[in-house]
């Protein structure tokens, strides 16, 4: 099988599940690109567990002519399993960090020009996953030099435990369902922070504005004021 050596167990598990669900072929080449799954009706399914902007080259090539289905899991429950260098489990704990459906907007900011287009489907499974860490004797830096401070562990894998709920977005109206139902006609980021979005309010409004779902009506001091774009109400 092609192109699997850098994949996590999480990515492989989701790819197998979606291949079975849609009766697709995994790791199939099309237009010089290896697609995670191509279904019988010619739809392309890409499982992405990292940076969504990495899909831009494929979106540019395929989106005009092929149905393109992005699956991006969010970890609403995360466990951390620490192992020694011999692979023996030292500890297993639940991480205090967790994502919500609103966590997707930071990733969506990199592909806003494609969102809401007729051929694109975005599917967000809420999942439980376990991250595998190897404990080291001394603090280490990662190969990509991304750590500000060295730590005495490094990640090796992540695997799927359970899928809870799935959110699917087809049209701009689907994204509107994430806005609070009691928003005033003219609203700002504070109106979202005071309801259910929390710290993701600013990036959520940025993405929705880029998509043309909401529009800026001006400012009150330094605060931008928005309304839902009328065309999206129908």
Image (tube, rainbow, N blue to C red):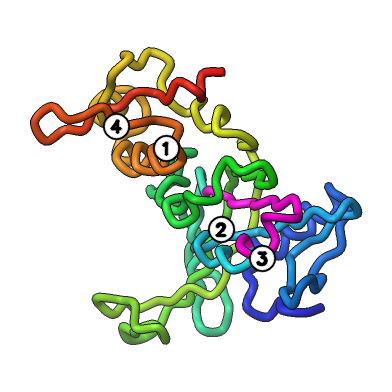
Residue in the foreground of this view, choosing between 176 and 217: 217
Residue 30 appearing in the image: yes
The range drawn in magenta is 59-74
Q: CA–CA distance between discs 4 and 2?
A: 41 Å
Q: Position of residue 26 (x, y in %)?
A: 82, 66
Residue 19: image x %, image y %?
82, 56
**Pointer 4 residue:** 216
C-alpha gap between disc 4 and disc 1: 11 Å
Work out whether 33 lies above or below 188. below
First reached walking from the N terminus: tag 4 or tag 3 = 3
Residue 61 got which mark?
Answer: 3
Q: Secondary structure at mark 1?
A: helix
**Position of 182 compared to 118: left or right?**
left
Closer-to-camera residue (219/75)? 219
Horizontal relation, residue 86 to residue 19: left or right: left
Percent of width and height locating residue 147 = 31, 76
- Disc nearest the viewer among 4 and 1: 4
What is the CA distance from the residue labelled 3 to the residue labelled 2? 34 Å
What residue is drawn where x is 49% and y is 27%? 176
Mark 1 or 2, nearer chain start: 2
Disc with the residue nearer the chain's start (3 vs 2): 3
Residue 165 seen from this side: no
Within 10 angstroms of label 2, few (less than 14), some, or many (20 or more) residues? many
Find disc 1 in the rendering and name its residue.
Answer: 208
């Amino acid at each position: 099988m092609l192109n699997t050596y850098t994949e996590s167990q999480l990515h492989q598990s989701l790819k197998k599940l979606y291949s079975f669900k849609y009766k697709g072929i995994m790791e199939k080449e099309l237009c010089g690109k290896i697609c995670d799954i191509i279904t019988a009706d010619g739809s392309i399914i890409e499982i992405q567990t990292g940076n969504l902007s990495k899909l831009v080259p494929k979106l540019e090539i395929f989106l005009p002519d092929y149905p393109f289905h992005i699956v991006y899991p969010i970890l609403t429950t995360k466990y951390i399993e620490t192992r020694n260098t011999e692979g023996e489990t030292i500890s297993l704990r639940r991480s205090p960090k967790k994502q919500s459906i609103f966590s997707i907007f930071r990733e969506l900011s990199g592909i806003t020009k494609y969102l809401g287009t007729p051929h694109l489907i975005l599917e967000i499974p809420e999942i439980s996953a376990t991250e595998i860490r190897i404990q080291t004797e001394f603090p280490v830096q990662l190969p990509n030099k991304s750590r500000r401070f060295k730590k005495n562990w490094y990640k090796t894998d992540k695997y799927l435990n359970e899928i809870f709920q799935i959110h699917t977005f087809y049209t701009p109206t689907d994204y509107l369902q994430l806005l609070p139902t009691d928003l005033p006609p003219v609203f700002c980021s504070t109106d979202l922070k005071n309801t259910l979005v929390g710290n993701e309010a600013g990036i959520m409004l940025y993405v929705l504005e880029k998509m043309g779902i909401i529009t800026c009506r001006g400012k009150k001091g330094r605060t931008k004021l928005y309304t839902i774009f009328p065309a999206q109400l129908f």
